[in-house]
Image (tube, rainbow, N blue to C red):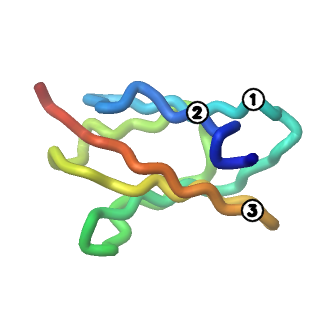
Amino acid sequence: DLYNQTLLYPNPAKEYITISFENNTLSFEEIQIIDLHGKLVKKIPFIERVFVGDLSEGIYFVKINSKTNTVIKKIVISNK
């Protein structure tokens, strides 16, 4: 399924996360990073390598959107 085909690493992350797909036929359009309170902290056009060094330590949800699909993955940001 799409969730398991979506790779997000490293986790925990310090400065960057990389998003890749086992099935490269997907065309994702946007990435949203949401904190545990549901607040949108970052919204950017889809790129494979995302800078997260400006986020506070903690747990976030990475929401990856296309026209027809959405994948949500949990990521830990650690400054250590």
Residue type at mark 2: give it: Leu
Q: Residue at x 31, y 30 (%)?
A: 13
Residue 64, percent from left and from top: 60, 54
Residue type at mark 1: give it: Glu
Q: Is residue 37 above or below residue 22?
A: below
Badge 1 density bin: few <14, some 14–19, many ≥20, Cα 10 Å: few
At mark 3, the secondary structure is: loop
**Badge 2 vs badge 3, beta-carbon distance below 8 Å:** no
Q: Which residue is mark 3?
A: 69
Mark 1 or 3 closer to N-term?
1
**Badge 1 vs badge 2, beta-carbon distance below 8 Å:** yes
Residue type at mark 3: give it: Asn
Mark 2 or 3 closer to N-term?
2
At mark 2, the secondary structure is: strand
Q: Which residue is mark 2?
A: 7
Q: CA distance from mark 1 to mark 3?
A: 15 Å
Badge 2 density bin: few <14, some 14–19, many ≥20, Cα 10 Å: some
Q: Residue at x 82, y 33 (%)?
A: 24
Residue 57, percent from left and from top: 16, 45
42 horizontally vs 35: left or right: right
Q: Residue at x 47, y 37 (%)?
A: 50
Q: Which mark is residue 22?
A: 1
Q: Is residue 35 above or below residue 79?
A: below
Residue 42, percent from left and from top: 40, 58
- Residue at the extreme bottom: 38
**How many numbered markers are drawn?**
3
Q: CA distance from mark 1 to mark 2?
A: 8 Å
21 horizontally vs 10: left or right: right
**Badge 1 vs badge 3, beta-carbon distance below 8 Å:** no
Badge 3 density bin: few <14, some 14–19, many ≥20, Cα 10 Å: few
